[in-house]
Amino acid sequence: MTVTQASRRTDDRVLTLVTRAAALTDVRAEVETNHDHNRWWPLTITDPRMRMLVAGWSTRINYRMVNTYAAVLARADTLGFDALTDLDDDQARGLVAPLGLTEARLTYLYSLADTLARWDKDGTDPAAWDSKTFIAAFARDVRGASYKVAQCAALYARGYHCGIIPVDSGMVTKLAPALGFTLPSGPAAHEHLRLLLEHAVARHTDALRALAADQNVTIPAEAAPTWWTHLTLIYFKRLYLNRPPARLCTRRPTCTTLTDCAHTQA
């Protein structure tokens, strides 16, 4: 197996898919809804520690639970990170229980708190690390984290437009094949795909910015459109790859039309 490496060809494939996906009405609607004020990682939460916590707690939450999820986050943020770690067992479980996976989420909270405390005691400033170093250390040191959670923690703690494109499991199993990418096995696949996507954005920043300019989103002048690209890809994956509709061409990436092409009518 030859793992795909970043190149002009892979960059162009990403641009082609993003261009097609961004033109889909339902994908565009989701991106516009979630770009400036994301429902899963809201700007109302400002403490970087809470943002890293939310990145872990947002896993395994589906759209039917979004209101419950938002209520739990609001209560947790009102308490504050330090107070959360001081709750007794029953209080902590009661807070997290509506999200499910209660013990796993509490394990993540306490391990995150211990890791941050240890880094602080050692004089380590994770904010000074580059994204690759931060993600590797976070995935290694925080129980219940993984590369995909570490990527989300890095992005949300540093802000939507920090240049990180988090990769979830569906992007590895559904999106990468649609792009014709071969990834390494195991957790490393998430990091490899992240770097491929970020490389493509770096090469095609101007073209992607031009696509985003046609939507009701705000991207800071100094920022690469990584957040917009992430949302476009993840909503295309959720809407078109998780349960492929008849309109979706099965000959990707050979056919770049994606939907409603001659192959879907054959």
Image: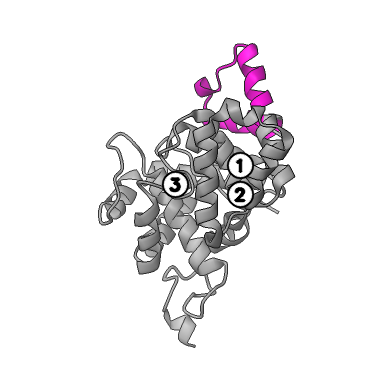
Up/down of 183 relative to 130, above or below: below
The residue sitting at 59% across, 25% down in the picture is 82
Quarter residue 141 falls in: top right
Res 194 visible: yes
Say few, some or many: other residues with alpha carbon within 10 Å of mark 3 (under 14 / 14 to 19 / 20 or more). many
> Residue beneath label 2, please?
59
- Which structural element holds mark 2? loop
Evaluate if marks 2 and 1 touch, with contact meaning CB atoms under 8 Å apart: yes
Range shown magenta: 112-140
Left or right: residue 222 versus residue 201 is: left
Residue 64 image point, x, y percent: 54, 62
Residue type at mark 2 is Thr
Residue type at mark 1 is Gly
Q: Is residue 126 magenta?
A: yes
Query: Which disc, if any, is residue 200?
Result: 3
Res 154 visible: no
Q: Is residue 185 magenta?
A: no
Query: Which disc, if any, is residue 56?
Result: 1
